Amino acid sequence: MRITVFGATGQIGGRIVAEALVRGHDVSAVVRSEVRASSLPDGVTVGVGDATSAEEVATRAAGSDLVVGATRPPSGDEHELTEIATALLSGVDRAGARLLLVGGAGRLRVPDGTGLVVDDPRFVAQEWRAIAKACVDQHECCLSRPDVDWTYVSPPARIAPGTRTGRYRTGTDVLLVDERGRSAISTEDFAVAVLDEAEHARYRGSSFTVAY
């Protein structure tokens, strides 16, 4: 499969690139500047592009089977998530590719049914609420484009570098927690889930979430 990754040098995007290479896929990475390319592994085709431009997305996505969006703006620029989502949706549509967009957990309902994760301080501290809210808006961008071949994947409340076990479980619109109420996964196993979806396309045109 020919996969193009936007945000390929980030914590999550980098793991997705590594997992895709291990599985033998043809991987292209789109970075904001050539300086960022030095952190990418051998075997990756690198291109410079602007993820907020639908025209550039379409150009970089040309010939790809799947485009993965794994960008994360710096603090203070959270609004870029919706700009990027809009550009990715339009660009992949022009290129005739699928979009697998890595989002946030904010859109999910909390397990006890009291509201959304974005509004629950048990899962989203105040300092993270801006990015969580931006992820909710990002998801709304996808819902507004039923004509595009997209999938939106939400991580659990906590995602951090760790161990690749190859194990996880999936859900749709409710935050997944374990028996102790924890909602977590390693970036490595999150990448496994992303590539499994890339290969099997179980959630085309919809959203899902993963966790231990």
Image: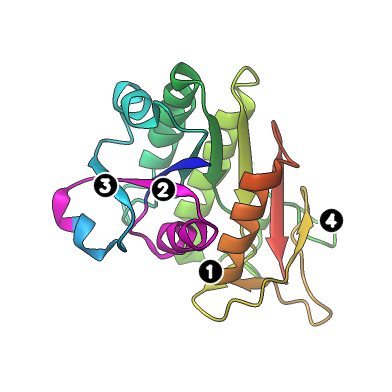
Give the residues in magenta.
8-35
Q: Which of the two discs, 1 and 4, labels the residue nearer the N terminus?
A: 4
Q: Residue at x 60, y 53 (%)?
A: 195
Count neighbours of disc 2 (C-alpha within 10 A) and say few if under 14, some if 14 to 19, many if 20 or more: many
> Which of marks 1 and 2 precedes in the sequence?
2
Give the Cα distance between marks 3 and 4. 44 Å
**Pointer 1: what residue?**
187
Please name which of the two marks, 2 or 4, marks the residue nearer to the observer: 2
Measure how far apart labels 1 and 3 are at the Cα level: 22 Å
Residue receiving disc 3: 46
Q: Residue furthest left?
A: 35
Using the rendered image of the protein, determine whether residue 125 is visible from the camera's viewpoint.
yes
Give the spatial CA distance, label 1 vs label 4: 27 Å
Measured in 3D between alpha carbons, the distance from the residue under mark 2 to the one under mark 1, in whole angstroms, is: 19 Å
Where is residue 125 shown, x and y percent of the image? 54, 68
Residue that carries the numbered disc 2 in the rendered image: 27
Tell me the SS state at disc 3.
Answer: strand
As helix, strand or loop, the secondary structure at mark 1 comes to: helix
Secondary structure at badge 4 equals loop
